[in-house]
Image (cartoon, helix red, strand yellow):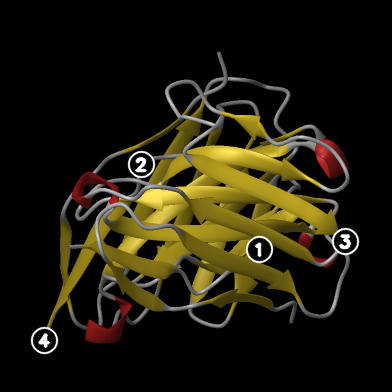
Amino acid sequence: GAVVSQHPSRVICKSGTSVKIECRSLDFQATTMFWYRQFPKQSLMLMATSNEGSKATYEQGVEKDKFLINHASLTLSTLTVTSAHPEDSSFYICSAREPRINYGYTFGSGTRLTVV
Amino acid sequence: QKEVEQNSGPLSVPEGAIASLNCTYSDRGSQSFFWYRQYSGKSPELIMFIYSNGDKEDGRFTAQLNKASQYVSLLIRDSQPSDSATYLCAGNYGGSQGNLIFGKGTKLSVKP
């Protein structure tokens, strides 16, 4: 089946620093990728839609200057959390729309971010 | 507004029983439906998708779609403790360019 690789799986950073998370589609091209955040015992929350070659579309309430998204190729999208604070600590998950599963999403394995 | 509704649970069933998970949707324009399983601390993984009325079976899992009544369900036969997870229902509005609308998930607990 389709594979979406997400890296790193876990990161701890100091408050005020930036963290970059990578999401790659390994065996298919993804013109669109999606970034989610999930707090403990809560639902997935869509943060933004990443479009190859154009600007990302952010959901209401998500700061685009804090969560920088770059989708420079058909197989790679990155999310950079800038000037991270403890309240940004969360589980970040990317996904891509996959034609072989009727355009459902294949999810990356997620990144556990802890800001200390 | 397009919505997908699920009972948050928890749904508790004994080992070996059939677990029935249900989902309703608000917009008849949805074309495909997806069931994902999410273990605690992990990302969602696709179990099945369905786009035609009726049943679709895959091993112990059966997805059922009823477009007239706007509901989709997932049956898990011979439930195992390893099936304990949160199950997410999602609808696709828009085909190849559509985005999935997720329900909030139903937590299933299978008791040994």
Compute the Cα span from label 1 to label 2: 23 Å
Q: Which residue is mark 1?
A: B56
Instruction: Residue at 43%, 53% (x, y): give it.
Output: B88
Compute the Cα span from label 4 to label 2: 26 Å
Compute the Cα span from label 3 to label 1: 32 Å
Q: Quadrant of the N terminus of chain B?
A: top right
* Element carrying mark 3: loop
Of the pair A11 and B19, the residue shown nearer to us: A11
Nearer the observer: mark 2 or 3; the answer is 3
Of the pair B36 and B42, the residue shown nearer to us: B42
Q: Is residue B33 left or right of residue A14?
A: right
Q: Amino acid at mark 1?
A: Lys
Label 4 crowding class (10 Å Cα cut-off): few <14, some 14-19, many 20+? Answer: few
Q: Chain of mark 4?
A: B
* Element carrying mark 4: loop
Compute the Cα span from label 2 to label 3: 30 Å
Q: Quadrant of the C terminus of chain B?
A: bottom left
Residue A54 x %, y %:
84, 38
Instruction: Residue at 25%, 64% (x, y): give it.
Output: A14
Q: Chain of mark 1?
A: B
State the mark number for residue A74: 3
Q: Which residue is mark 2?
A: B104
Label 1 crowding class (10 Å Cα cut-off): few <14, some 14-19, many 20+? Answer: some
* Element carrying mark 2: loop
Compute the Cα span from label 3 to label 4: 45 Å
